[in-house]
Image (spheres, helix red, strand yellow):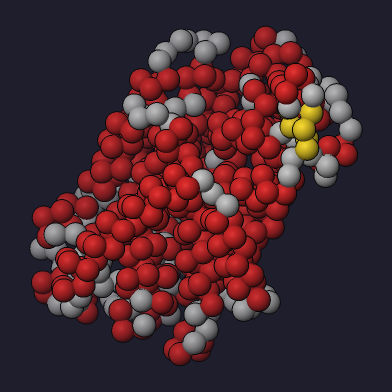
């Protein structure tokens, strides 16, 4: 499918917005350190730990840690796929550019829709957790606070990317400190044996414990993949990384390793340190910290968590705006919409309309019940990884096999093949409602492809790669 791999200069006139192509190039300004800071911040291990993990405690009890370990192993395979594909196809389009180039435009379009589901839903889910952790200082309605965080993140997303890398890096330090303190306190107040980590139990009826079945763990893997999934941000930033063929793979792998540690160690500590299984299932980590320490430490941890959530929202808006920017550059939309989404700020070089298109609807979504969004996101993430694994299987055929300077994963094609099988199995265990909602959105997108994009295939949805990358 290499015929769809084109530079912007090679596109027909009708495919290009009215603005000169040069104004639509992103600036290469970040290396491994800056990219890792931004990617770790999008993985946002602390906000995932304190906002999403409590839901896993409720359904998996002490099996949460085991589920995350299994998810980490799966994510290593996913990281290998992202590293190879991200250096082979370095584009701000991320997954859709990689999959679309290697397996066809229609597959790339479906991947884009899965990514769009994730990028529009995840930031408000994270932002909605802010109010709970600001409670020691100020009481604000969770929906109002979540919307305010999304709007703040939108403003920050309009600034220069290098400045944001250091701003989010400072917040990231606070995240890691908060996670380290929670881990220390949890290990200092253990109430159960480490055997519950490999023989997990959960709160049952009348105060009794109940075993966690393998079926529950498999079903919980979608949420666990969601908790760890931010390491993929590196491929979205590949057009803004210096020497992406070297930087992308290092950033992906380093981010996964550090992020998984920042999540897993406190999860184990909380699992062992929770006073009882009902408290663990309640997921009130701030409350447990208060019991393990004094109110001052609890307040400090809560404020660090709140900052971590703000940090996550900022980086997610940055990442997600690049996805919309790339889709507009590749002519996924009618011309007026595409010209707007492809516009770059003259002062900061950021895709400012695409940033607004992500941040403002995200603020609105904060007023939608979060329970209706969590399951759909887990399904979309698993489906996204399955498409990436499929593309990895096709990454070494034809001209792509001979490309120089591409990071190649070990144990290919075994790794992507096994990953694909496991992800399909995980998807089969998800709730029917979540599968139907995600499938419905995907079906509508398929109709858009059939009736709008496919008839205009010569000028629309032509996946582009920066000219300097094709020449390398």
Quadrant hosting residue 300: top right
**Which quadrant, please, contains the C terminus?**
bottom left
| In the depicted structure, whether residue 204 falls above or below residue 136 | below
Of 244 and 209, the residue lying toward us: 209
Of 166 and 207, the residue lying toward us: 207
Image location of residue 173, percent across then percent down:
60, 35
**Which quadrant, please, contains the N terminus?**
bottom left
Q: Residue at x 52, y 19 (%)?
A: 132
Image location of residue 121, percent across then percent down:
39, 41
Q: Residue at x 83, y 42 (%)?
A: 199
| In the depicted structure, whether residue 174 falls above or below residue 451 | above
Q: Residue at x 79, y 24 (%)?
A: 208
Q: Residue at x 64, y 70 (%)?
A: 418
| Residue 276 seen in the figure | yes
Of 272 and 303, the residue lying toward us: 272
On screen, residue 307 versus residue 237, left or right, reads right
| Residue 37 seen in the figure | no
Quadrant hosting residue 459: bottom left
Image location of residue 416, percent across then percent down:
59, 71
Image location of residue 446, percent across then percent down:
28, 63
**Count of numbered badges drawn on the protein:** 0
């Amino acid at each position: 499918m290499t015929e769809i791999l084109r530079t912007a200069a090679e596109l027909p006139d009708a495919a290009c917005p009215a603005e000169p192509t040069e104004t639509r190039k992103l600036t290469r300004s970040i290396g491994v350190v800056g990219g890792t800071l931004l990617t770790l911040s999008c993985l946002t291990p602390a906000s995932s730990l304190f906002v999403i993990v409590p839901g896993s405690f409720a359904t998996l009890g002490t099996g949460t840690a085991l589920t995350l370990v299994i998810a980490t192993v799966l994510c290593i395979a996913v990281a290998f796929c992202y590293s190879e594909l991200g250096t082979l196809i370095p584009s701000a389009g991320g997954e859709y550019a990689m999959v679309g180039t290697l397996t066809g435009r229609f597959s790339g379009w479906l991947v884009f829709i899965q990514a769009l589901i994730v990028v529009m839903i995840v930031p408000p889910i994270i932002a909605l957790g802010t109010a709970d952790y600001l409670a020691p200082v100020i009481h604000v309605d969770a929906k109002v606070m979540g919307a305010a965080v999304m709007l703040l993140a939108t403003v920050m997303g309009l600034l220069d990317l290098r400045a944001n890398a250091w701003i989010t890096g400072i917040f990231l330090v606070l995240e890691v400190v908060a996670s380290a303190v929670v881990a220390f306190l949890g290990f200092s107040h253990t109430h159960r044996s480490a055997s519950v980590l490999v023989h997990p139990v959960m709160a049952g009826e009348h105060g009794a414990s109940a075993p966690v079945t393998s079926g529950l763990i498999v079903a919980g893997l979608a949420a666990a993949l969601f908790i760890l999934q931010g390491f993929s941000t590196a491929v979205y930033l590949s057009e803004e990384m210096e020497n992406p063929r070297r930087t992308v793979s290092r950033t992906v792998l380093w981010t996964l390793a550090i992020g998984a540690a920042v999540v897993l160690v406190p999860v184990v500590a909380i699992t062992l340190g929770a006073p009882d299984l009902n408290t663990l299932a309640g997921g009130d980590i701030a409350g447990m910290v208060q019991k393990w320490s004094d109110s001052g430490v609890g307040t400090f941890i809560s404020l660090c968590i709140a900052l971590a959530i703000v940090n996550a929202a900022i980086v997610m808006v940055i990442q997600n705006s690049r996805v919309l920017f790339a889709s507009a550059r590749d002519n996924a939309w009618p011309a007026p919409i595409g010209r707007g989404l492809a516009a770059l700020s003259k002062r900061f070089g950021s895709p400012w309309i695409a940033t607004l298109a992500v941040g403002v609807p995200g603020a609105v979504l904060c007023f939608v019940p979060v329970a209706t969004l969590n399951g759909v996101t887990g399904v979309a993430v698993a489906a996204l990884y399955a498409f990436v694994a499929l593309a990895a299987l096709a990454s070494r055929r034809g001209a792509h096999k001979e490309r120089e300077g591409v990071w190649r994963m070990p144990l290919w094609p075994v790794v992507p093949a096994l990953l694909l099988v496991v992800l399909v199995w995980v998807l089969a265990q998800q709730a029917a409602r979540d599968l139907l909602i995600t499938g419905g959105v995907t079906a509508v997108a398929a109709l858009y492809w059939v009736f709008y994009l496919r008839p205009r295939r010569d000028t629309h949805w032509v996946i582009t790669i920066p000219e300097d990358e094709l020449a390398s």
